[in-house]
Structure formats: C-alpha cells, structure tokens
Image (cartoon, rainbow, N blue to C red):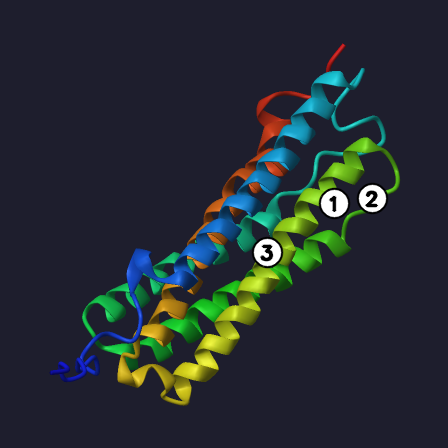
Amino acid sequence: MTSPPLDLTALPRGARGARAFAVWGVALLVAIELTVVASMITSYFYLRVTTSGPWPPPGIAPPDPTLATLALASLLASLVPLHLTLRALRQGTPARLRPTLATGLALAAGYVVLSALDLAKKPHDWTVNAYTSIEWTLSGYQLFHVIALTGLLAALTVAALRGRFDRLDPTDLAIVDGALLYWAFVAAAAVPAWATLYLSPRLLGADGGG
C-alpha cells in the first residue's frame, strides 16, 4: 500500500537572513571589493614611501577636504535610515521601508553629487604622475561604489512604493537583506578611503620616502 504524498505547502519558500542565497552572494561581492579597496590603499602608501621628495609631489597641493568631508558625512548619515530599515524588517513592518529607503537614497545621491564636484574641481587629472593616478583611482572607485548603491536603493525604493515588500515574502526580503549588507559596506569603506586621501597627507607630513 502506497503512502499518501507529503503536503509541503506549509514549508517556507526561501531562507531569510544569513542563510539566504542573496545575502551569501552579496557577502562574497563585499569580500572581493574589500580586497580591491585594501589593495588601492596599500598602493597609495607604497607609492608614498617609495617616492623621493614631498608627498604629494611638488606643484600639487594636498587635496581640499571640504567637499569630500561633506560627502562622507552624507553617506555616514545614511546609516540611520539603514538602521531603521533593519528594524522595520525585524519587526515585520515592511511598509516602513518606504521612507527609510527614500531617505537613504537621498543621502547616497548627495554623496554622489558632492564627490563628483570634488573630482571636477581638482586642478589636475590622473595622468600627471603616480600620486594623481592613485588619487583619482581610489576616489573614482569609491564614487562608483556609491553610484551602484544609489541605483540599488532607487530600485528598492520604487519596489517598496509599489508594495512589493508588503507581503513579507522571504525571497523579496532576502534581496533587501543583501542590499542592506552592501549599503553598510559602502558606507564603511568610504571612511578609510577618505582618511587615506585627505587626512594622511596632513597627519603624516609632506615627506615621502627616500
């Protein structure tokens, strides 16, 4: 006598949190990009200690930190709506994602605008010497990080406004979990990049290597 088929309709459709495939995928992406950022910062200081004379080289003033600092402050401020978004997910109130994602989108867009203005006002491009090359590379890479984040937040905000996340579907919310992980990484990675480019020339002095 054959057994009746098992009723599996009550099983969850997907995993949430750290077990979700979307989160694992973003975590691997973050690991790769973290390695790239660390390599760029290492290259910056390698060039500094192996360059004879002052750093930045003669004829190039240390970069003005005004716009970059305002941009960093805007991006770090986005950690507040990030926290509120996480809390909305944990409390099972996805409708609250709309204002928090929209606020995060505005703050990330503020970083993009200020950073683009900072690059545009530099009196030199990346072809002058090794210093300008690594300066533009690290600045540009971080800017592209936030541009990607801005696009991601824009897509999530539109989806939230259309009510896609109102049903607490595990698959959809796993995507949000992964996006929030990337959001946190981008904000965190901006701090050492800013410190390397704008703080280290003032704290470490103008002397390069021997």
How much space separates mark 3 and mark 1, taking CA atoms?
14 Å
State which tag comes first along the sequence, 3 or 2. Answer: 2
- Point out the residue furthest to the right here: 128
Query: Where does label 3 land, which residue?
Result: 145
Q: Earlier in the sequence, mark 3 or mark 1?
A: 1
Residue nearer the viewer, 89 or 136:
89
In this figure, which residue is indicated by the disc labeled 2?
A: 126
Q: Residue 136 got which mark?
A: 1
The quadrant of the picture occupied by the C terminus is: top right
Q: Residue furthest top?
A: 210
Q: Which of marks 1 and 2 is nearer the N terminus?
A: 2
At a point 49% along the width and 65% down the height, the residue shown is 107
Q: Residue 115 carries which label?
A: none
Q: Where is residue 93 in the image (x, y as percent from the top left)?
A: 22, 77
Residue 48 placement (x, y as % from top left): 71, 23
In this rendering, would 104 be left or right of 19? Answer: right
Q: Is residue 174 above or below residue 2?
A: above
